[in-house]
Image (cartoon, rainbow, N blue to C red):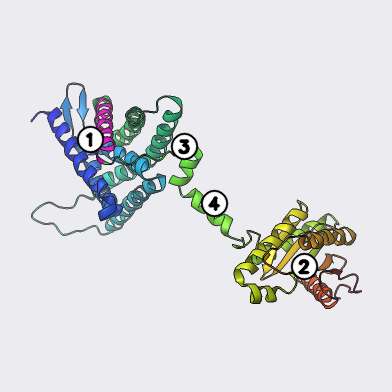
Amino acid sequence: MSGFLVLLAQAAIYFAAMAVIFNFRTVIGIGVFYCVLGAMHFLETYLAAVFFIELPFGLISPGSTVMFAGKLAFFLLLYIKEDAESMRQPIYGLLIGNVLMVVLAMILRAYSEPVNLPGYNPDLRFLDQIGFLMIWGTVLLFIDLIALVIIYERLGALVTNTIPGRIFISLAIVLSFDQALFYVGLTLLTGVPVSAFYGGWIAKIGAAGFFSLMLTIYLRFIETTAIRARPQGAIDVFDRLTYRHRYEKLVERIGKDPLTGLQDRGRFDAQGPKMLQVALRSERSVSLMMIDIDHFKSINDRHGHPVGDKVIREVANAIMRTKREADELFRYGGEEFALLCPEAPPGAMALAERIRAAVEAISHPDLDRAITISIGIATFPTDANGIQELLTRADSALYEAKALGRNRVFSAAAAGQRPWP
């Protein structure tokens, strides 16, 4: 069989098998598709390093031309029909597996006298070479896929919105880039001639055309569900392929109260001392308001916790609308809030009165009475020398506000309290 027919037969069988597995991913699980990609990765890299077919325009490796180009095409199909997050899972699996393979092979080198067998004996040098190529190839694959998705999306906005055109141009550009960089690593290890570079490049462009046609047929006749529109920017694709968006969401959740979205008690404990230190260096005051919803337990008992939760959110929103930009609001716990504001006592008292009035003005159709709050204020450094003492003074002032009838503001200074010795 001629070299061209060998490549064509391999490409046809590869596409048919992978297309069937991909099409049944909802039945057998997408993990099967990932496992097949991983199993083919070693053969693909091995053939790319040692097995070449000579055609009139140069040396061609089936592993690099057919199998890698096909894998790239199916990754693009995975993105088109699923999303970037589905794409990234096999990439990370391949990279971690390849690194582990190299590490384990290096450990085996510490044993210098393996048993000689009548048949084939271990060649750890070859394992080192193929391991390097597999890691290098997987790193390139990661870069390729980011570029592939970005180019695919940008083509839809700038050049052509036809699926076949976008697939072919995206594959052709990325395969050209990959051919150049993979050849660098390959020639450093094996010294393959330059004809493997330009021959492989020509063949990859042909493979891009073949797999683009096959993907178009697949999307037109096999999996005909509408393709979801997802305009993606470079930063968004990068974030999703690198898990950065997961990290950013985690950071957003850490220190946030899930009910109100305010900073939580942990953020208060961390940020409070810092604000006092800044105030001390600049010789300014920081006032702490401890804010408590009056008779909140009776709201939960009479109207239920969903209504109670709604009241907490409404009070939090009223405080957020009234406070200044520099003030830091925290949900301290339950129905209690803490507000740190860089303000001396007279200004803090005026702000607290505005907050109290704003909460009292909220309309509550679910309740038979207005919602009110009590506020206790203490100021650093006049009332306290540190964050814990400041908290104690503000709590005491809050207790006095409640004892005096609630729905009022009370300050530590008004009670004649002084810093501890």
1 or 3: tag closer to the N-terminus = 1
User: Dot 3 surroundings within 10 Å: few (below 14), some, or many (20 or more)?
Assistant: few
Tag of residue 372: 2
Q: How far across and down, in percent of the image, does residue 393 sit?
A: 81, 72
Q: Quadrant of the N terminus?
A: top left
* Secondary structure under the numbered disc 2 in the rendered image: loop
2 or 3: tag closer to the N-terminus = 3
Q: How far across and down, in percent of the image, does residue 317 sit?
A: 70, 57
* Secondary structure under the numbered disc 4 in the rendered image: helix
Amino acid type, callout 4: Glu
> For the residues carrying marks 4 and 2, which lies nearer the camera in this image?
2
Indicate whether 304 appears above or below 205. below
Q: How far across and down, in percent of the image, does residue 308 sit?
A: 65, 69
- Find disc 3 in the rendering and name its residue: 231
Whether residue 114 is visible, yes or no, is: yes
- Find disc 4 in the rendering and name its residue: 248
Badge 1 vs badge 2, beta-carbon distance below 8 Å: no
Indicate whether 109 appears above or below 380. above
| Residue name at image x 83 percent, y 67 percent | 378
Whether residue 189 is visible, yes or no, is: no
Amino acid type, callout 2: Thr
Mark 1 vs mark 4, CA separation in Å = 38 Å
1 or 2: tag closer to the N-terminus = 1
3 or 4: tag closer to the N-terminus = 3
Residue extent of the magenta highlight: 201-222
| Residue name at image x 27 percent, y 28 percent | 209
Mark 2 vs mark 3, CA separation in Å = 47 Å
User: Dot 1 surroundings within 10 Å: few (below 14), some, or many (20 or more)?
Assistant: many
Indicate whether 325 appears above or below 19. below
